[in-house]
Amino acid sequence: MGLAEGQASLAAQNFNMPALSPTMTEGNIATWKIKEGESFVAGDVLLEIETDKAQMDVEAQDDGVLAKILIGDGSKAIQVGARIAVTAEPGDDVSTLEIPPEENKPSKPEAPKEEAKSGSAPAPKKEGSAPAPKSGSKAPAGKAQKQTYPLYPSVQHLLKENGLPKEEADKIPASGPNGRLLKGDVLAYLGKINESAGSEVAARLKALSHLDLSNIKVMAQSPKAAPKTAAAPEPEAMEELGVEIALSISLQAVTEVQQRVQKSIGVFLPLSTFIARAAELANEDLPRSQVAKPSADDLFNAVLGLDKAAAKYSRGNFVPEVTALPPTTLRPRAPAKKPDVLDFLTGKKAAAPKAAVGGAAQVVGPLNVFSVSVPKGDERRGRVFLERVKSVLEAEPGRLVV
């Protein structure tokens, strides 16, 4: 039997006043939902707790039995961490349980001497009666005035809890901003704290609200350092110039197609349209650049080992520059006249050949030079582009009309 009692004794544990918010320091027990000796399971509401801001339920975290209620319904101002009940494990015999000692007894604020002697909460004050100020306490900095603003919820709760009507708020010295009544003013009026506490806090906050610059000293100026000799400017890095690739291209076939289109459908297509469409076709599937930085897809393929199987071609963005040389006229030379034998024997000089006047002259058409500038190492890529442009403009310019 002694062993059973020892096990039961070990199973009992204290149930302390929980903190339902980070700022909660005390609360009131409204009602216990579980009676002594009753069992409960996790999630059951054990009791209701009231604070100056809200009323909340306290749920059980584990299964158990409520062995003993130490602080009953309606208890006020219970410090967080104070023991309020004793619980046991499910199936324990409550009658044989030994109440464990209180582990952490919360420190209670100093109570007035009258309350320490009686050990009971102060009796509610009658309406219209204000407590007499303590002798030796400093008078509050605020003064009693009519409260034109709505009262704070904490102030309303204190007035209701202590049985004071709302009209009593006009008789309490207020130390809040714009003469508003604070919770500390009501507590000082009820004698629960020093009457000067509210005014001291208000004075401290007022002092901290202004930036004190009296202890800031001007930094002494350091002696000017001798001016450093200007260092010779570093030579700018020369930007690597590109390589220019050029190719002569005849536009005779393009002009013929241009004339046929204008005669057939009455639409004039400028040469720039043919050149732009030819460049668009030539930029498709060019050899990959040897100097371009790898893209994100290229790096991803390299990680997966797919860079060797990647396509060896890419789209270019070349735009050719066209230089047109003026046409030249070539006249045929007259054949040199053979010297006559008689003229040679008689010593007669042969007449100098006269310059040909008139006659058919051969006009050479304009010479068009297409060129692109490519980075060093990409000469083949630029040359392939120009050769494609030449092929389209000279051999099949008709496909550029559609």
Image: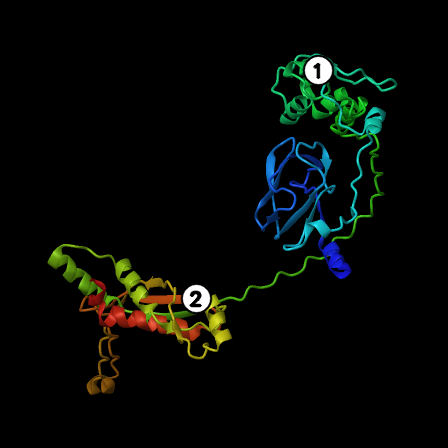
In the rendered view, tell whether residue 110 sits above or below residue 149.
Answer: below
Tell me: 228 left or right of 356.
Answer: right
- Residue at 76% over, 58% down: 6
Quickly name the residue at label 2.
373
Cβ atoms at labels 1 and 2 below 8 Å apart: no
- Residue 367 visible within the image: no
- Residue at 35% over, 63% down: 323
Residue 108 placed where, x, y %?
79, 36
Quadrant into which the N terminus falls: bottom right
Residue 179 placed where, x, y %?
69, 17
Residue 346 or residue 215, whichever sits in front = 215
Residue lying furthest left: 264
Give the image quarter of residue 36. Answer: top right
- Mark 1 residue element: loop
Residue 159 placed where, x, y %?
67, 21
Residue 356 or residue 92, whichever sits in front = 92
Amino acid carrying label 1: it is Lys
- Residue 340 visible within the image: yes
- Mark 2 residue element: strand
Quickly name the residue at label 1.
126
Tell me: 15 left or right of 274.
Answer: right
Residue 54 or residue 297, whichever sits in front = 54
Residue lying furthest front: 1
**What kind of colouring is applied to the model shown?**
rainbow
Badge 2 density bin: few <14, some 14–19, many ≥20, Cα 10 Å: some
How far apart are the two marked residues, 1 and 2, measured between alpha carbons? 100 Å
Residue 18 or residue 143, whichever sits in front = 18
Badge 1 density bin: few <14, some 14–19, many ≥20, Cα 10 Å: few
Residue 192 placed where, x, y %?
78, 25
- Residue at 55% over, 64% down: 239
